[in-house]
Image: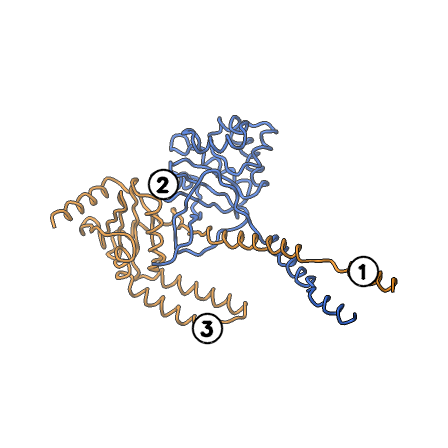
Chain colours: A blue, B orange
Amino acid sequence: MGRFKIKKQDTFIDMTPMSDVMVLLLTFFMLTATFVKDEPVKVVAPGSVSEIKIPETNLLTIFVEKGGKVFMNMDSPKGMEKLAKEMRKSHGLRLTDAEMKEFVNVAMFGSSKSQMAAWLKLENAERNSYLNDNPKAGIPCDSTHDELKEWVGAARAVCGEDMGIAIKADKTTSYAVIKKVMDSLRSIHENRYNLITALKNEE
Amino acid sequence: MAKTGSSKQKKMNARVDFTPMVDMIMLLVTFFMLCTTLIKPQTMEIAMPSDVETDAQNQTQVAANKAITILLGADNTLYYCVGNPTEVPFKKTEYGKDGIRQVLMKQNADALKQVQALKDKFAMEQSSDPETFRKNKEAFQAALKEIKEGKETPSVIIRPSDAATYDNLMSILDEMQICSIGKYVIDKFTDTEQGYVDAAEGGGAAQ
């Protein structure tokens, strides 16, 4: 009888240490995980051999879609809030307080100032399809009507000198559009910015 | 007998089976592991030189015979000229290691040799101590910068036309990095440059 009992116990493996380790690993990965923000507009960055990492905090990203529309986002909701307040105060962006709250949570924005309130009223899916399909979407950045520099200027004013600017442009975008964006940044003396690329091996 | 039986049952109950929990946690761990590792390589950057500094530099460089002008045309075409663009005709070439890189490497051969020597030197001094590692890296960067900004290195003027794509521009900026060229400028593409491109095309057809 005694022998029989010991045999039965042997088949039972103690999983406690294993689950301990697993939980530890799980917490580690959960805490270090950084998820990509959902980008409503698809932008395929060109490859590059550069291996410099992008600054992780306090970053303003300018997206240039292949059709030439320009969008923007800030990496934190706090930054978005400060940006919206500054735009309302100094550059005549007309938003109500409720609309401001909506604005803080959008993943990416890009419409002229006059269209902004109407765009925020839309449902989430409609907003994305507006950005993708409407030819009028995108922040205007022509030499005659340049709102991009107001946005970037406002962001610089509220987020301080250490705010990084990154440009993520699609690889098939014409240089004419990139030039407009760069000229716009140059006009407000923003000469240091990062171009986001995907990693590529040296041939 | 009845007593021992009941105590045996209690003993068995005290053990909780962790296997399903471990299964689940394993799944979660794999999920998070895959998520984190897949994202990292997707954000890389290139720092652009400031435009204000380069404008003044540009004026002096165009006259120097160490200047290389690169024109980016439509449909992935590429033209280059070593020296003064008004005197030396433009030649057509292509992107990648058999095209423009050969030209740049030839022009920058001395600096490249120095960079290679520097790399070899620092490869010998690899250290696992983080403090020494950091110091070495800083010294390496400083030495690299000095080589790149040396008097004899060529300076490159990149002039992308409106028809060029962003990918073209990035390929050229990549070449600058591969060929260790420290002095480069992105400048405007005007009608004069269009004239050079047309001339190069005409010359190419005649050959």
- Look at the numbered disc 3 and give the secondary structure of its residue: loop
Labels in figure, total: 3
For badge 2, the amino acid type reads Thr
**Chain holding disc 1:** B
Q: Quick check: A174 above or below B105?
A: above
- Look at the numbered disc 1 and give the secondary structure of its residue: helix
Inter-mark Cα distance, 3 to 2:
44 Å
Residue A173: assigned label: 2
Residue B125: assigned label: 3
Inter-mark Cα distance, 1 to 3:
66 Å
In the figure, residue A186 lies in which quadrant?
Answer: top left
Q: Position of residue B195 (x, y in %)?
A: 20, 42
Front residue of B3 and A134: B3
User: What residue did someone put label 1 on?
Assistant: B9
**Chain holding disc 3:** B
Residue positioned 55% across, 40% down in the render: A158
Q: Going by the picture, which residue comes out furthest to the bottom?
A: B124
